[in-house]
Amino acid sequence: MTVRVMIVDDQAVVRTGFVAIVGSEPDLEVVAEAADGAHAVELARDVLPDVVLMDIRMPGMDGLTATRLLTSYENGPRVLVLTTFDQDAHVHDALRAGASGFLLKDAQPEELLSGIRIVASGEAMLAPTVTRRLIDAFAEGPHGAHGVPVPVEPGPGADALAALTPREREVLSLVAAGLANAEIADSLGVTTGTVKSHVNALLSKLGLRDRVQATIFAYDTGLARPRSGRAAG
């Protein structure tokens, strides 16, 4: 199946570059372009993209607000945020807004195309330089790494943990620790397929989109906790 992609960036030259890269792939199709968040939200209702490449900083409605709106719709698109700013605050804000991935604009074309396909398949995509720092930021607690605030939302989320089996809670805690399915399988002495089934089940029960939201949920509800005595840096 062809993945329908919408590109959102206020710089025409950037959009043109992304269109050329994405449009060259037989399994990807650029169905729309937008120069700001408001136009993107409007267009998405008509063209129904599967994946939106979203810039963060744009005039008018920014990418974070647009992401929050797009991902709030039933069967809304998955959003892959693209930015020049490799900063914790942007990562946290984008992921909490509902983004399924985060890549820097200077990523290689192969990384961009891989990110689109990963996000379209229902997984999460984070730039390699971002993944570990995201986990560490949550492990720092409410103030986050480097002083970046990480909001904690106790709310009704903790009650949802009761719906999980003990094994699913164990898998969730390992996901929040940043382990891949194969690593979790080795840790628990089960197959990778079994781990994938547990991950899919817990995501469904908790109403979460992907592993990134699962990680946020685990720290917000206290299932995952800061590691004591963690070395600085």
Image: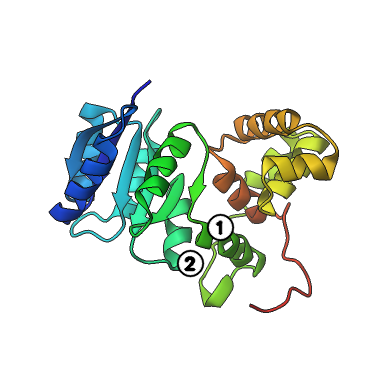
Say whether residue 51 is left or right of residue 209.
Answer: left
Which corner quadrant holds the N terminus?
Answer: top left
Callout 1: SS = helix
Q: Which mark is residue 108?
A: none
Q: Say which amino acid is labelled 1.
A: Thr
Image quadrant assignment for residue 46: top left
Instruction: Using a 10 Å C-alpha cutoff, classify the residue at mark 2 as few (fewer than 14 neighbours), some (14 to 19) or many (20 or more).
Output: many
Horizontal and vertical percent position of residue 107: 38, 56
Residue placed at 78% from the left, 75% from the top? 229
Q: Earlier in the sequence, mark 2 or mark 1?
A: 2
Residue placed at 71% from the left, 55% from the top? 222
Residue carrying label 2: 88
Instruction: Using a 10 Å C-alpha cutoff, classify the residue at mark 1 as few (fewer than 14 neighbours), some (14 to 19) or many (20 or more).
Output: some
User: Is there any visible trace of residue 177 in the rendered image?
Assistant: yes
Horizontal and vertical percent position of residue 103: 41, 54
Callout 2: SS = helix
Query: Residue placed farthest to the right in the image?
Result: 189
Q: Say which amino acid is labelled 2.
A: Asp
Say whether residue 20 is left or right of residue 231.
Answer: left
Horizontal and vertical percent position of residue 24: 26, 35
Say whether residue 92 is left or right of residue 164.
Answer: left
Residue carrying label 1: 131
For the residue pair 153 and 39, the one nearer the viewer reads as 39
For the residue pair 193 and 220, the one nearer the viewer reads as 193
Which of discs 2 and 1 lies nearer the camera? The answer is: 1
